[in-house]
Image (cartoon, rainbow, N blue to C red):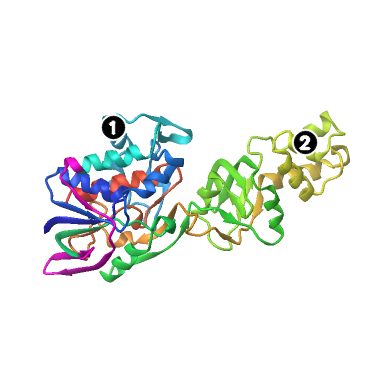
């Protein structure tokens, strides 16, 4: 059969593009090797899908071209997607930092997208590998499950290689390269970081969490950090991991609300208090003990000079870790990198050198912060693409 467009990938971006284009009267076919649609949607947000963020803005996305995402994000906003969610009667709530979640299940978002696709007469074929993609005479031909499908336009919406156990692969990048498109080398993002050497001491704190300010280069995030048996995790660490590269340090402010002279004030008030107990008034006990041991102060505050206490406070506000790696694509929520934005139109995601070829969602070199931003990019890029399918 001949279609107006074939969309490769039945994830967030692909289903969004299919639904919008289908409802614009286009004949749309969605193909995926997975046996069910929206698998990453189903596991997101602890099963409740952090489907967007009301604070969405272009500066919360990483890309070789920081301006690329502006057009799509401006034309299809978090409020637009929220209106769709509410139109389907899906109850939702806001958590911290503008994150919106389903009250019920992430499955509601998948069902909503499939309902929207049904309204547009979209055909969805799943459970078979895509074995060949060809382009000739202005038409794209895709071999899927023993059948060859033909369309005037082809959309790459197969995501990135993060979470391979869900079936994720680098197919989008391989296909882009076959069409002569450049790819920004992908790397894990929103991923726990690992510690080695002397810093393995902190692994003994596995399970301990506390609110911090984490920094890497110019990026900084105030959220919880979690010590694990392999290193560092938690929202603050996941956020800075997108900016981190091998050899970089990650700096932690363990006490972001404390006055620089708070230990000196504690010394004046309770001179016999130990540094460990002083820290434990603001931090989890096990963390306070480990930090106090590393600071190597006198047994009680009275035995510490004001200079030593100021130096300790300064170190606590700029504690430096140098991760020896990350937990890789297996634990990464997304990837940084992907199909180069220089190859695409920011208006409709179409390849400038291959008319009729589009790329959307995580397949593209646009990566959002933790907290619903990547889903909003999927909705916005899918919507923008659908306007010209």
Instruction: Report the Cα–Cα distance between label 1 and label 2.
Output: 49 Å
* Residue corresponding to mark 1: 83
- Classify mark 1: helix, strand or loop: helix
Residue 180 screen position, x and y as percent? 27, 70
Looking at the image, is mark 1 or mark 2 earlier in the sequence? 1
**Element at label 2:** helix
| Residue closer to the observer: 309 or 237 | 237
Residue 99 horizontal side relative to residue 134, left or right: right
* On-image quarter of the N terminus: bottom left
Point out which mark residue 278 bears: 2
**x and y, in percent, of residue 84 in the image:** 27, 34
Q: Is residue 279 above or below residue 125?
A: above
When asked about the image quadrant of residue 306, the answer is top right
Taking the image as drawn, is residue 13 in sight? Answer: yes
Q: Which stretch appears magenta?
A: 118-146
Magenta stretch holds residue 313: no
Q: Residue at x 39, y 33 (%)?
A: 104
In this rendering, the answer to whether 276 lies above or below 66 is above
């Amino acid at each position: 059969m001949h279609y107006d467009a074939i969309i490769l990938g039945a994830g967030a971006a692909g289903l969004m593009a299919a639904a919008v284009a289908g409802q614009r009267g286009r004949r749309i076919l969605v193909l995926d090797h997975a046996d069910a649609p929206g698998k990453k949607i189903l596991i997101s947000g602890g099963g409740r899908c952090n489907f967007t963020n009301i604070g969405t803005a272009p500066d919360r996305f990483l890309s070789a071209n920081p301006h690329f995402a502006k057009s799509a994000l401006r034309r299809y906003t978090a409020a637009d997607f929220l209106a769709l969610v509410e139109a389907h009667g899906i109850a939702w709530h806001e958590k911290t930092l503008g994150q919106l979640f389903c009250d019920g299940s992430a499955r509601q978002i998948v069902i909503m997208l499939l309902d929207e696709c049904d309204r547009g007469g979209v055909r969805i074929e799943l459970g078979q590998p895509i074995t060949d993609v060809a382009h000739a005479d202005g038409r794209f031909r895709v071999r899927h499950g023993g059948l060859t499908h033909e369309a005037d336009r082809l959309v790459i919406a197969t995501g990135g290689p993060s979470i391979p156990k869900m079936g994720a692969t680098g197919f989008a990048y391989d296909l882009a390269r076959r069409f002569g498109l450049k790819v920004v080398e992908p790397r894990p993002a929103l991923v726990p970081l690992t510690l080695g050497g002397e810093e393995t001491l902190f692994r003994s704190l596995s399970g301990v969490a506390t609110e911090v300010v984490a920094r890497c280069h110019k990026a900084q995030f105030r959220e919880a950090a979690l010590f694990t048996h392999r290193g560092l995790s938690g929202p603050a660490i996941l956020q800075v991991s997108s900016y981190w590269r091998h050899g970089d340090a990650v700096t932690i402010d363990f006490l972001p609300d404390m006055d620089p002279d708070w230990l000196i004030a504690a010394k004046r008030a309770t001179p016999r208090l130990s540094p460990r107990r002083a820290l434990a008034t603001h931090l989890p006990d096990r963390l306070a003990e480990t930090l106090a041991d590393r600071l190597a102060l006198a047994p009680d505050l009275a035995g510490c000079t004001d200079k030593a206490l100021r130096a300790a406070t300064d170190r606590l506000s700029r504690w430096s870790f140098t991760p020896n790696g990350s937990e890789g694509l297996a634990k990464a929520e997304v990837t940084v990198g992907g199909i180069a934005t220089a190859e695409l139109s920011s208006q409709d995601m179409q390849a400038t050198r291959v008319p009729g070829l589009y790329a959307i969602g995580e397949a593209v070199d646009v990566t959002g912060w933790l907290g619903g931003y990547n889903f909003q990019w999927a909705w916005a890029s899918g919507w923008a693409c659908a306007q010209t399918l």
